[in-house]
Amino acid sequence: MNIFGWEIGKIFDTQNVVSLIRLIILMLGGIPAIFLLSKWVQKYTTKKLSAQQGIIFSKLILYLGIFIIAYLVLNDLGFNLNHLIEAAGIVRLIILLVVGIPAILLLSKWVRKYTTKKLSAQQGMIFSKLILYVGVFIIAFSVLNEFGFKLTHLIGAAGIITLAVGFASQTSISNIISGFFLIAEKPFQVNDIITVGSTTGVVLSIDILSIKLRTFDNKYVRIPNETIIKSEITNITRFPIRRVDLNVGVAYKEDIGKVRSILLDIARKHPLVLNEPEPLVIFNGFGNSSIDFLFGVWALKSDWLAVKNNIAEEVKKRFDQEQVEIPFPHLSLYSGSVTQPIPINIVKNSDSDSQTNIQV
């Protein structure tokens, strides 16, 4: 008996034991195997990528596995598959979408991880996005081809679309061109700390239209590439070492040689301060209340903040131990003579001992 291509009698044909066993294996073994594989893919992808991508890949594996098992089961039951053969384009379309897109995403992630390890984070991001965009373009091209879409029409329409978009997105085009200049010149890379205008932060990404920064108070800042090109940029972490500068003032009565020796001794004993380049103690001038020095020490860029805090605390501690005075501003009032200050006498009131008057 044959209904819609199903040969029902073939299922109960005792002579076709091999087909029956294969059918049982597919139903009892294939489906649980697909579910287990789907669960493992979700767990692994969630650990390596994210929970959302884990769910997506898990469902793709599940649906693709069920489709393959259903195809094999129907084939064993004698289902007429000629219409599926005629619709092979649809099967290729499903494979392109179900397999191609996850494969492109995984390849992009792997390229970024490998290139970051071998070259730099910025180049890893660039190659990753290049793989992603090229892969998506190839899949889109293949899907349109399966639908019989003539790309000559697309090329003809591209000129009109480009002209219209060009007038509407001049700023975006300027940002794209500026992005290429930034990638070529490389004034900074991903994970560098830069200052643009009044904004200082860590570079998260360098994209076609803009760069993204994370400030030290955990704010997300997007700056268009055109603004970056036109602005002055300070790359704080471009070089492996940085100098920590501390302005130090001592009283006029202090011995300058002693102060210099104390500061250099502090630098030599600090575990994070580099011996090369040598620490600096530079006489800055005579201040209103103090003799001013610039105390500069070198440290690795990763230790800069720790050294800046510790070195100031150590200077205060040592100056207290060595009885070196750190002065504060003084104000002297004169009555008009060259050297004599205004005389001030504190006189107690005769009526009450608790009340005093100040006479000048």
Image: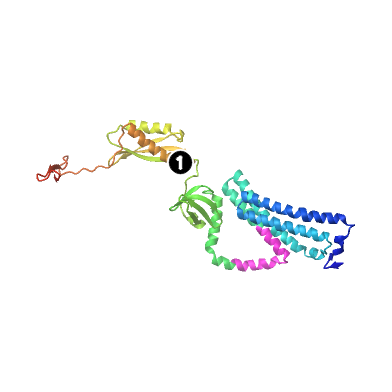
In which quadrant is the N terminus drawn?
bottom right
In which quadrant is the C terminus drawn?
top left
Q: Is residue 111 left or right of residue 273?
A: right
Is 163 or 126 nearer to us in this picture?
A: 126
Rendered location of residue 289, percent (x, y): 27, 40
Q: Is residue 350 left or right of residue 196?
A: left
Q: Residue at x 80, y 53 (%)?
A: 25
The reply to whether residue 233 is in sight is no
Is 115 or 53 nearer to us in this picture?
A: 53
Is 281 or 180 nearer to us in this picture?
A: 281
The reply to whether residue 176 is in sight is yes
Classify residue 250 by image quadrant: top left
- Tell me, yes or no, whether the highlighted magenta stretch contains residue 101: no
- Tell me, yes or no, whether the highlighted magenta stretch contains residue 140: yes
Please give the range of residues in magenta. 136-162
Q: Is residue 124 left or right of residue 301?
A: right
Classify residue 80 by image quadrant: bottom right
Q: Residues within 10 Å of mark 1 (few under 14, many from 20)?
A: some
Q: Residue at x 61, y 69 (%)?
A: 160
How many numbered discs sit on the rendered protein? 1
Q: What is the three-letter code of the residue carrying label 1?
A: Trp
Q: Residue at x 49, y 41 (%)?
A: 302
Classify 62 as above or below 148. Answer: above
Label 1: element kind: helix
Predominant SS along the magenta part: helix
Per the image, the residue denoted by label 1 is 304
Rendered location of residue 264, percent (x, y): 39, 32
Q: Is residue 321 left or right of residue 156?
A: left
Is 290 or 69 nearer to us in this picture?
A: 69
